[in-house]
Image (tube, rainbow, N blue to C red):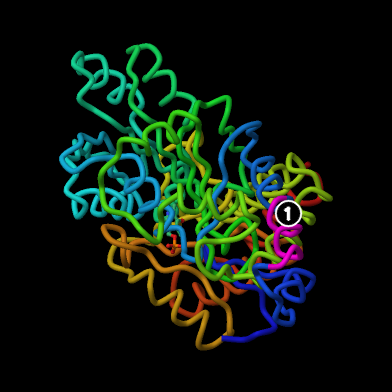
């Protein structure tokens, strides 16, 4: 691996120098007013990225996985019924976490490469006339397969059924890179982390809670201490944390939010869409297929690319690292060895992306795949010249 090359893994993402510098700071007293002055603007900035007016934002020293646990443990009781679909490794892990918390998960098995089955959710919710389902889980962007799902459609499924279940959304690889509408979609808990769209090192779980989710915390009895949002809220009310906050990372988050706002949230999304479209043109030119089964679900933050039958896709990732010092993502779970992933989220430009496509091509040719050097790069170049 080389420190000079950009990384093309779907998190952690490349860190702009300015954000890196922001994390690097002397010790301050986290119980001083200086910390409070930093904290509240950060919570406001995260709320704007979620497109919410009133979400309660909590930031834990953790990762996205800790955000999942925050959502479950604060709002649910042992034995509660959860509706979820498994369409990749990340949705699978959240389901596994529910089961380990003693929740009763109704799993809709969904082909890896498909989006979340909103129709199926609608059917199940309509049939649940006793409202036994307490929460619906939705992975907005399934990072293992490069599939983005329509969260608005899940909201409609709940509304059409007149169902009161909470809607928990994993936005770890979408928030800050793709349009996310906490208020419009009636999201009850949104989960993300610091190391993807926010371009920071791993280390923060960032969650947003609706009023309805906050109300659920009043009666929820699953055990929680470290991730208790009410303890965290008490801390925030006193400009502090219930324990020691990761001040450097939070200062980095402040810099990240500023960078995102300066570019403009919608411009950030458009840039991700443009870069991703260039990658998709390259994949097409290589004669390869995405793991994502149809264009409506193509992800703008990560592409999982299928390799020919009998070829081990992980060889691409290993050779890229060993020979060219560049990082791509391996396939996970059901698609391990069948796909390799190009992460294209966070701090990236068209030019950086062309370097990644160029290396991917060299590696595939080295490994004997029938691909012409320059073909994918040229297809992306054509698009980046004219694409908006
Ligand atoms: C990365 C990721 C996670 C896990 O986050 P960690 O920060 O590694 O705990 C969860 N869900 C999705 C969709 C992700 O991409």
> Is 151 located above or below residue 347 in the figure?
above
> Is 214 located above or below residue 331 in the figure?
above
Q: Nearer the viewer, residue 33 or 189?
A: 33
Residue 178 in the image: state x and y as whole percent: 61, 43
Residue 215 in the image: state x and y as whole percent: 41, 31
Tell me which secondary structure the magenta stretch mostly adopts.
helix
- Say few, some or many: other residues with alpha carbon within 10 Å of mark 1 (under 14 / 14 to 19 / 20 or more): many
Residue 275 in the image: state x and y as whole percent: 68, 52
Residue behind label 1 places its C-beta within 8 angstroms of ligand 1: no
Q: How many marks?
A: 1
Describe residue 332's horizontal placement relative to residue 276 as left or right. left
Quadrant, the C terminus: top right
Quarter of the rendering containing residue 149 = top left
Describe residue 107's horizontal placement relative to residue 26 as left or right. left
In this view, the residue farthest toward the right is 262
> Is 8 located above or below residue 53 in the figure?
below
Q: Is residue 35 magenta?
A: yes
Residue at 57%, 24% in the rendered image: 184
Residue at 26%, 57% in the rendered image: 334
Residue at 65%, 70% in the rendered image: 30
Q: Nearer the viewer, residue 261 or 313?
A: 261
Residue 123 in the image: state x and y as whole percent: 25, 18
Q: Secondary structure at mark 1?
A: helix
The magenta region covers 32-40
- Residue that carries the numbered disc 1 in the rendered image: 257
Q: Nearer the viewer, residue 333 or 20?
A: 20
Indicate which quadrant contains ligand 1.
Answer: bottom left
Describe residue 110's horizontal placement relative to residue 159 as left or right. left
Quarter of the rendering containing residue 387 = top right
Quadrant, the N terminus: bottom right
Residue at 71%, 76% in the rendered image: 28
């Amino acid at each position: 691996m080389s420190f000079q090359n950009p990384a093309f893994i779907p998190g952690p993402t490349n860190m702009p120098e300015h954000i890196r510098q922001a994390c690097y700071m002397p010790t301050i007293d986290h119980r001083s007013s200086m910390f409070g002055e930093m904290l509240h603007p950060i919570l406001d900035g995260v709320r704007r990225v979620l497109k919410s007016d009133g979400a309660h934002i909590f930031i834990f020293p953790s990762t996205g996985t800790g955000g999942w646990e925050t959502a479950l443990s604060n709002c649910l009781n042992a034995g509660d019924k959860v509706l979820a679909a498994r369409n990749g490794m990340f949705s699978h892990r959240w389901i596994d976490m529910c089961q380990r918390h003693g929740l009763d998960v109704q799993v809709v098995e969904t082909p890896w490469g498909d989006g979340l089955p909103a129709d199926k959710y609608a059917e199940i919710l309509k049939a649940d006339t006793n409202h036994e389902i307490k929460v619906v889980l939705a992975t907005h962007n399934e990072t293992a397969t490069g599939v983005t799902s329509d969260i608005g459609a899940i909201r409609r499924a709940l509304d059409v059924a007149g169902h009161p279940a909470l809607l928990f959304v994993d936005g770890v690889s979408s928030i800050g890179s793709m349009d996310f509408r906490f208020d419009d979609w009636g999201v009850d808990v949104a989960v993300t982390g610091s190391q993807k769209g926010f371009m920071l090192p791993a280390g923060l779980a960032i969650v947003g809670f609706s009023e309805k989710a906050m109300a659920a915390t009043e009666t929820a009895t699953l055990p929680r201490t470290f991730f208790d949002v009410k303890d965290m809220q008490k801390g925030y009310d006193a400009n502090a944390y219930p324990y020691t906050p990761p001040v450097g990372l939070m200062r980095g988050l402040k810099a990240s939010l500023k960078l995102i706002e300066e570019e403009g949230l919608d411009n950030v999304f458009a840039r991700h869409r443009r870069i991703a479209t260039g990658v998709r043109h390259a994949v097409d030119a290589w004669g390869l297929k995405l793991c994502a089964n149809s264009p409506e679900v193509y992800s703008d933050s990560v592409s999982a690319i299928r390799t020919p039958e009998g070829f081990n896709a992980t060889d691409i990732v290993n050779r890229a690292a060993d020979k060219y010092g560049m990082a791509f993502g391996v396939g996970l779970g059901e698609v391990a060895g069948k796909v390799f992933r190009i992460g294209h989220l966070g701090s990236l430009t068209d030019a950086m992306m062309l370097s990644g496509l160029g290396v991917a091509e060299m590696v595939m040719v080295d490994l004997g795949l029938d691909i012409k050097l320059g073909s994918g790069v040229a297809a992306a170049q054509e698009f980046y010249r004219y694409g908006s």
